[in-house]
Image: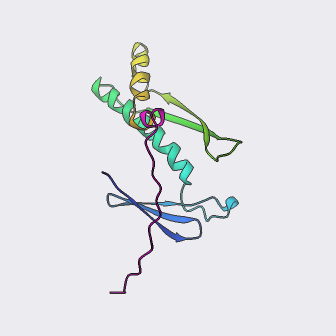
Amino acid sequence: MAAMVVKALGGDRYAVRVRGHELIVDQPASAGGTDLGPTPVELFVASLASCVAHYAGGFLARHHICRDGLRVDTSWQMSQNRPARVASITLRITPPPAMPTERLPALLAVARACTIHNTLEKAPDVSILVTEATITAPV
């Protein structure tokens, strides 16, 4: 099973540590944060958009089409109702200029099969648990 750790940094800032990488998550100043990083919702949408881009890029590579110019523009809307959640996400793939028009349906099919999209289509079981805090002695 893959794993990552998220640690509080103060205020609305958190460090996400995964495989030796660290991302800072924060809230915009308008929401009380210091805007040192994207919000959790922005990372969620970014994971979908970057997964679509990755799969599209793989398709292009397999068909020996240069990826230069590949782009995924993404927008999302939050639900107006409870519970708080993302209500809709729109992704627009702009293929590189070298992409033959007849390959566009296949590119779309591959992009729709990305891991994050599949996960949203067939939601995983999510368990949220609380463990007791442990006090560690200074070394």
Instruction: Give 87 or 27, whichever is nearer the viewer.
Output: 87
Instruction: Give 103 or 49, whichever is nearer the viewer.
Output: 49
Residue 131 lies, in percent from the top left, at: 44, 67
Instruction: Give 79 or 112, whichever is nearer the viewer.
Output: 79
Which residue is painted at 44% across and 27% down in the image?
A: 112
Tell me: residue 119, above or below residue 108: below
In the image, the segment drawn in magenta is: 118-139
- Among all residues in the image, which is located at the extreme bottom? 138
Q: Is residue 96 left or right of residue 26?
A: left
What secondary structure predominates along the stretch shown in magenta?
A: loop
Task: Name the quadrant of the C terminus.
Answer: bottom left
Residue 105 lies, in percent from the top left, at: 43, 17
Which residue is painted at 49% across and 34% down in the image?
A: 72
Tell me: residue 30, above or below residue 75: below
Residue 135 lies, in percent from the top left, at: 41, 81
Q: Is residue 8 left or right of residue 77?
A: left
Q: Is residue 59 left or right of residue 89?
A: left
**Dividing the picture into quarters, in which one does residue 124 lie?**
top left
Q: Is residue 88 magenta?
A: no
Tell me: residue 86, above or below residue 133: above
Which residue is painted at 43% across and 32% down in the image?
A: 70
